[in-house]
Image (cartoon, grey):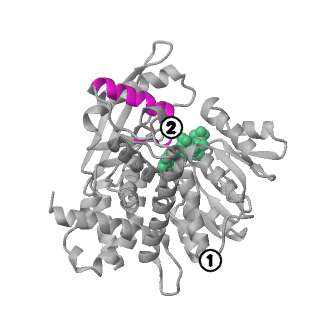
Amino acid sequence: MQAKIDAFMEEVRARNGHEPEFLQAVQEVAETVIPYIATKEIYNGKNILLRMVEPERAITFRVPWVDDNGKIHVNRGYRIQMNSAIGPYKGGLRFHPTVTMSVLKFLAFEQVFKNSLTTLPMGGGKGGSDFDPKGKSDDEIMRFCHSFMSELFRHIGSNTDVPAGDIGVGGREIGFLFGMYRKIRNEFTGVLTGKGLTWGGSLIRPEATGYGTVYFAQNMLETKGDSFEGKTVTVSGSGNVAQYATEKATQLGAKVVTLSDSSGYIYDKDGIDTDKLAFVMELKNVKRGRISEYAEKYPSAEFHKGKTPWEVACDIALPCATQNELNGDDAGKLIENGCICVSEGANMPSTPEAIAAFHKAKIFFAPGKASNAGGVATSGLEMTQNSLRYKWTRQEVDDKLMQIMKEIHSSCLEYGTDENGYVDYVKGANIAGFVKVADAMLAQGVV
Ligand code: NDP
């Protein structure tokens, strides 16, 4: 079996050798899905996985824009349309200087499996730009978003491809992008999700990824009759996902003691309660400040420059910042300090070495494509409401989100439980996500 996996990876590497993040994501899927394919006659000889690693379409484009001093800048825009076998392409836009084709292809590939897991009819895509929103004025952000959409618009549509937010793209950016799309197309349609509540957005969408990550962890803990009550939780990041993961974990009776950004992490031994979280939301979403300012405001907190929170003892860890932010050494520290559960809010935050360590220690580990799928699932619910021209209540959307997370958890159990009862959620998520897309591809022929 290993020879088959190696041969497959060799072929993928020959075409994509300069794309490390993409290869990392494909390797993880290949290791779990290829042995499964070997047991299923219907998939044999159909080269389905090889077809799935090649984007249906990958677009790059120029994004010129003018700063407040009249200087002209040029960034690169991307949209990867990975797989539309089960529905229109769906996936976020990331604005960050580290954005490359490799990063977006890994995200788009993971998105195909994640969207399949949600039970909703959505294909997978991802896009963005190497533009850095940090330190830019609102006007500069607006000009950049307008320029970005003046090209992207011809590749997307409410039945073709529906982008959303990701790192560096929140409500403000979605507003500017939507405004330009509406103007150029002369139509008001659900072409983006994460919209404002007065112009087509869904209740609970901003909360959904963070809430869903905690709901998934709760589902895992419940299999052993455990819960968040009284637990100490470490969270990384301090953006959208981290904020709402903190909120939900706190509501469920846990104490969240860390948050971070790219400059370091804060540790608050007393816990980040509702008032302190409101300060973080204002700091990050309105003032666009740094997490170190939290430690200046609250004497119970310390700021650890240039470090990640995984050295802090906790019961539950929720990585919610970015890819490869938790390595093998970090995993070792978490396990040594008694961590029993890791649920990924970010995409691929744990390195392969970290995942191997979690599996070896037999603690709960949920990969992002399962545990953070609540965000895109609620985007799917936003699309449904847009099509219906209707709006569900907060409770209705939250109930649907909870139900979807439960179903994703059950799918992982179905395909990931080993003979000793340990659940490999990576294997479970990869196979469950694969089956639905593969069956659709089989039915539709070689296209
Ligand atoms: P935000 O832009 O709101 O926040 C990102 C956070 O991560 C910030 O605190 C940022 O710090 C930190 N961060 C970003 N890059 C790095 C880095 N290289 N090293 C350390 N910290 C970093 O993004 P989101 O919260 O939306 O996204 C976070 C993660 O969740 C991403 O992996 C994203 O793909 C994933 N995700 C998001 C979904 C959503 O609905 N938003 C859905 C599913 C997954 P700083 O300000 O210093 O850059």
Badge 1 element: loop
Q: Which residues are magenta?
A: 164-184
Residue 75 got which mark? none
Position of residue 264 in the picture relative to residue 15 (left or right)? right
Furthest residue in direction bottom, as rendered: 419
Q: Is residue 285 above or below residue 56?
A: above
Query: Does residue 26 sit above or below 197 in this rendering?
Result: below
Q: Nearer the viewer, residue 380 or 12?
A: 380
Residue situated in front as seen by the camera: 100 or 207: 207
Answer yes or no: is residue 49 visible: no
Tell me the distance, in whole angstroms, between the alpha carbons under discs 2 and 1. 37 Å
Give the percent coordinates (x, y) of residue 137: 54, 22
Query: Percent from the top left, x then y, of residue 174?
Result: 44, 34
Question: Which residue lies most toward the right here?
Answer: 299
- Numbered circle sitting on residue 224: 1
The residue identified by callout 2 is: 168
